[in-house]
Image (cartoon, rainbow, N blue to C red):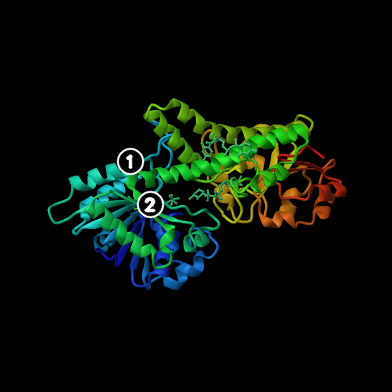
Amino acid sequence: MTHVKNICCIGAGYVGGPTCAVIAYKCPDIKVTIVDVNAIRIAAWNSGRLPIYEPGLDEIVFARRNKNLFFSTEVEKAVNEADLIFVSVNTPTKKTGVGAGYAADLAYVESATRGIADVAKSSKIVVEKSTVPCRTAESMRTILEANSSDDIRFDILSNPEFLAEGTAINDLLYPDRVLIGALQTPEGLNAQKALVEVYAHWVPTERIITTNLWSSELSKLAANALLAQRISSVNALSAICEATGADIDEVAYACGRDARIGPKFLKASVGFGGSCFQKDILNLVYLSEQLNLPEVAAYWKQVVDLNEYQKKRFVSRIIKTLFNTITNKRIALLGFAFKKDTGDTRESAAITLCKNFIQENAKVRIYDPKVSSEQIYMDLSEPGIVDNTEEVKKHITITSSAYEAADNTDAIVIATEWDEFKTLDYEKIYDRMNKPAFIFDGRLILDASKLQNIGFRVHTIGRAAI
Ligand code: UDX
Ligand code: UDX
Ligand code: ADP
């Protein structure tokens, strides 16, 4: 059996970086090298200020860096030295061509795979870590086998990552499960065992699930689709609550107490964001269509459609409440990240809200404790949103505190559930706002009756107005 002694991870992003840092932390006997073509990113990983913010990540990286954990741009060298290679490159949704808007762009996966085939001088276990459509491993295998020789073989594994941002380190240290898919051949099973042995350094073996390659690939898409589907279900119910006087938190709590349903991922919100949910569901939709299963495709597509509807519904409620116009009104947008405890803004609901406010000619004052101004300008300046940064700057002001954001505004909109928004001095904020002062809580984190007593008019997702 192969014993892994040297791991290379291609792609030093949100997945590859933390995952392989934790492997190095838990497996001091294994050398782990994380490589990336992006030299700036690698320099940041080698500096005192890591390129991604994740609670607990600094400690883990600083503890192992330059001992058995290395960050490098020398892809070829690291690939050659490794016996096991994680492919953790980006797989964005295709913007043009066949499957545009739905299918994953596999150009980076293919290029990384070809890179391995070109330079490998010994046999390798190649592990698909990026989220990819079912059967991508098959393409990777075809490329690698076409380029292998008698004395070099490549075994492919699928080992999807289930970490969530903001809790990545905890998720990696104490995973619910680790999933490893392999071809059901003696060589495939041997490679699977080698990777099981790596995780067994810290994960109880009953939590390491081994399956065939295709089950593993599909499980990743399926898990994200099921999680997102719960949020869209609860968000659909939130619309009924607002119209009837039921309270979505009460409804979700009552349903979640059923052990068959469970309490997690039932928090209504202005809409889910993040780099995975929408992308993975659209992948699943595309896959279903390719397999000539239009009813299945339509079922999953509705999860994304409902999410768009939820954002639109929230914006409409804000405009309607502010006397049917927000032109030249000042709105404080609290939170820009797609969820708390991360600086990541990919697919954040805040982007859609902000875009809509700008289109209505409102003046938006944005505060987020972790998202940089540059990132906010970049997100809002994307083609199709507002044409350029200068135009965006006319409509938005980025502030360094929630208080500053709320100054002289007509309304506060909570877009991200940062803890600090729960404990702000709302009396002080109220005094400095235009009257009537409105609060729109898109995350159900504020005590509505307390705010009402101060004088605010409060609108919460999933509750009738008070
Ligand atoms: C259901 C609810 O479970 C119960 O809480 C409510 O009070 C009444 O409705 P019931 O209809 O008696 O109860 O049976 P249930 O066990 O929920 O099964 C309903 C149907 O779903 C059955 O046809 C069952 O075979 C099917 N089912 C259930 C599945 O196909 N897959 C499952 O995983 C579970
Ligand atoms: C998700 C999956 O949880 C993770 O397993 C997978 O590996 C990657 O995708 P992530 O996108 O980092 O992780 O965050 P997650 O906590 O799942 O939240 C996604 C979005 O759903 C956020 O915008 C969050 O605010 C929203 N959400 C989550 C809700 O609106 N309600 C909930 O109850 C839970
Ligand atoms: P994820 O969220 O899936 O981790 P990211 O975009 O954060 O995705 O990270 C993917 C990383 O992979 C990027 O830093 C990118 O530069 C890197 N990358 C993409 N293709 C290659 C390649 N062929 N060789 C090395 N690094 C690559």
Residue position for label 2:
129
Q: Residue at 39% of width from left, 65% of height from top?
A: 200
> Residue 266 or 452: which is nearer the viewer?
266
Residue 79 position in % (x across, y down) = 27, 59
**Where the N terminus falls, by quadrant?**
bottom left
Is label 2 in a helix, a strand or a loop?
A: loop
Front position among marks 1 and 2: 1
Are there few (<14), some (14-19), or many (20+) residues within 10 Å of tag 2?
Answer: many
**Where the C terminus falls, by quadrant?**
top right
Q: Quadrant of residue 83?
A: bottom left
Q: How many marks?
A: 2
Amino acid type for the residue under numbered disc 2:
Lys
Q: Quadrant of residue 61?
A: bottom left
Q: Relative to residue 95, is residue 90 depicted above or below?
A: below
**Residue 145 shows in the view:** yes
Are there few (<14), some (14-19), or many (20+) residues within 10 Å of tag 1?
Answer: some
> Residue 219 or 139: which is nearer the viewer?
219
Residue position for label 1:
135
Mark toward the start of the polypeptide (1 vs 2): 2
> Residue 397 or 181: which is nearer the viewer?
181
Residue 220 position in % (x across, y down) = 43, 46
Residue 196 position in % (x across, y down) = 35, 60
In space, the residues marked 1 and 2 are separated at their CA atoms by 13 Å
423 displayed left or right of 122: right
Is label 1 in a helix, a strand or a loop?
A: loop
Q: Residue at 45% of width from left, 33% of height from top?
A: 285
Identify the residue at the far left of this view. 150
**Residue 365 shows in the view:** no
74 displayed left or right of 238: left
Amino acid type for the residue under numbered disc 1:
Arg
